[in-house]
Image (cartoon, rainbow, N blue to C red):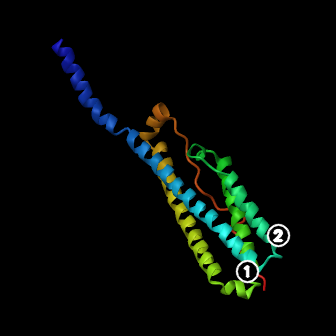
Amino acid sequence: MLKRFTLLLMTALVALPLLSGCGYNQIQKNEEAVFAAWADVEATYQRRADLIPNLVETVKAYAAHEQETLQAVVEARASVGNAQVSTGDLADPAAMQKFQEAQGALSGALSRLLVVVERYPDLKANQNFLDLQHQLEGTENRINVARQRYNQAVQSFNASIRTFPNNLTNKFLLHLERKEPFKAEAGAENAPKVKF
């Protein structure tokens, strides 16, 4: 009986350091970092979506006959609301692609809106519009930073489930899938054409 207890104790003492190096906890921490980074991405996109109605209303007061452009912005904002990605979808390339396309359409519509604004000197001088434009520019920068942080978290997580010995822990215990990073929009490699 004492021999058996001693053998079990020795086995536990040998196995304990091995279990601490299996990466289970680190994989969990890395996945939580991905979820937190994704929440930051969503929050910055939400900030942009919240600014858009104010921007549209300000422009509408000056450029009522630019209804087509204003409508495109409103529709793009609505499509962004329909293209939500949950943390469970972060491993789904199709869901991420749909989300990125909706956000890209909104960015394009906002760019067209800002081109329209160039035709209205009074609007460009309006303090409310200038404040909204600065907030929108700052938000676009925040979106870029949040995407970069998300991609860094995804890279750490993906590496943690693919490297030894963590890959064994993931294969036999966790069964987690790689997360999808943000990718450049189609055509982003081409410089925009400016016409005067």
**Residue 58, x across and y down, in percent:** 69, 76
Which element is circle 2 on?
A: helix
Residue nearer the viewer, 176 or 58: 58
Name which residue type carries label 1: Val
Residue occupying image coordinates x 63% and y 79%: 128
**Looking at the rendering, in which quadrant would you find the N terminus?**
top left
The residue furthest front is: 61
Which element is circle 1 on?
A: helix
Q: Is residue 9 visible?
A: yes
Distance Cα–Cα, label 2 vs label 1 = 14 Å
Residue 83 is tagged as none
Task: Tell me the quarter of the picture where residue 187 sits.
Answer: bottom right
**Looking at the rendering, in which quadrant would you find the C terminus?**
bottom right
Residue occupying image coordinates x 72% and y 88%: 121
Q: Judge whether 6 appears above or below 34 on screen.
A: above
Residue occupying image coordinates x 53% and y 53%: 38
Q: Judge whether 187 appears above or below 178 on screen.
A: below
Residue occupying image coordinates x 71% and y 87%: 122
Q: Judge whether 16 appears above or below 67 on screen.
A: above
Q: How many marks?
A: 2
Q: Which residue is mark 1?
A: 117
- Callout 1 crowding tier (Cα within 10 Å): few <14, some 14–19, many ≥20: some
**Residue 85, x across and y down, in percent:** 62, 49
The residue furthest top is: 1
Q: Which residue is mark 2?
A: 68
**Residue 90, x across and y down, in percent:** 58, 47
**Residue 113, x across and y down, in percent:** 74, 74
Horizontal relation, residue 28 to residue 108: left or right:
left
Horizontal relation, residue 25 to residue 41: left or right:
left
Asked if the residue at tag 1 contacts the one at tag 2, i.e. Cβ–Cβ closer than 8 Å, the answer is: no
Name which residue type carries label 2: Glu
